Image (cartoon, rainbow, N blue to C red):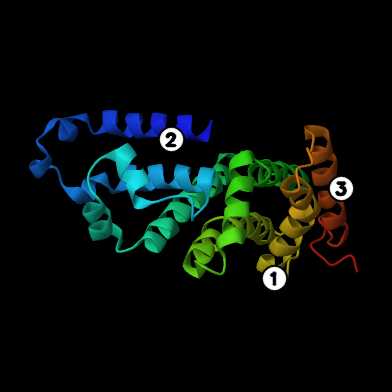
Amino acid sequence: MVMCNTISMVKSAQRQTGERKALPRRFVSVSSQAPVIIDTAAELFLDRGYEGVSIDAITALVGGSKRDIYALFGDKETLFRRAVEKLATERADLFREVPLSDDLRAALTSIGLKIIEVLLSPRALALHRLIISEAARAPNASEAFLTNAPLRAYETVAQLLRQHAAKGDVLVPDADISARIFVGALVQDLQLWALLGKAVSETEQRVKAEAVVQHFLDGIDIRRGKDVG
């Protein structure tokens, strides 16, 4: 299934750059092929792992030569990092789709459900497994993953808390730490179960999100903006 998606993605990208593809090879900028190369490499890495992907396999799908890829990225590890960055950003961008209510409980529940949905999606789990398996070999890729996935989730929640704190709805001494606690409580056990192959139903996801929101709000006074203690 991943390989079918890979081929479809390559064809789609080629259609989007159809005018340039129609030109003789010597007139096509190598750098203009970078997005297609990264997209293709990302799908291959997800499907086969780092060791299972060769530069030849990538050029077989996107065309060009190994020299072109090395000219663009320098080495396979750098291409891997760029692919991971692309995959992580793709997941993190989904957090922006959540319409947030003016009510803090409703807003936390909405973003909580979205975080669970995103991090438990098949692509996110595949990326997580890939990063864990290659962390020692490619620390730069691990850093790209952390910057563009978990940290984006923390930032989304922290920004929400700051907005409500600014309105006087709640007192949050450190929004960044509170956001990390919230996200960790949301996904820690669910993500582990999913990584080990256990299906997590939508009902289980909602029950978990609502419970975490309740416990989180129990620690703050959303009426007077004071610690409950």
Q: Which residue is mark 3?
A: 211
x and y percentages locating residue 119 in the rendered image? 65, 47
Report the amino acid beneath label 1. Asp
Report the amino acid beneath label 2. Thr
Q: CA distance from mark 3 to mark 2?
A: 39 Å
Question: Marks 3 and 2: which is nearer the front?
Answer: 2
Q: Count the numbered circles shown.
A: 3
Question: Marks 1 and 3: which is nearer the front?
Answer: 3
Q: Which of the two labelled residues, at mark 1 and mark 3, occupies the earlier sequence position? A: 1
Around disc 2, counting alpha carbons within 10 Å, would you say few (fewer than 14), some (14 to 19), or many (20 or more)?
some
* Figure quadrant of residue 157: bottom right
Q: Residue at 51% across / 68% down in the picture?
A: 137
Around disc 1, counting alpha carbons within 10 Å, would you say few (fewer than 14), some (14 to 19), or many (20 or more)?
few
Q: Is residue 9 above or below residue 190?
A: above
Q: Which of the two labelled residues, at mark 2 and mark 1, occupies the earlier sequence position? A: 2
Q: Residue furthest right?
A: 229
Q: Residue at 86% across / 47% down in the picture?
A: 211
Identify the disc placed on residue 174.
Answer: 1
Position of 49 with respect to 58 (left or right) is: right
Q: Residue at 79% across / 39% down in the picture?
A: 200
Report the amino acid beneath label 3. Ala
Q: Which of the two labelled residues, at mark 3 and mark 2, occupies the earlier sequence position? A: 2
* Figure quadrant of residue 197: top right
Identify the disc placed on residue 6.
Answer: 2
x and y percentages locating residue 7 in the rendered image? 40, 31
Q: Would residue 67 be seen by someone viewing this image from the given angle?
A: yes
Is residue 51 or residue 87 the one in the foreground?
51
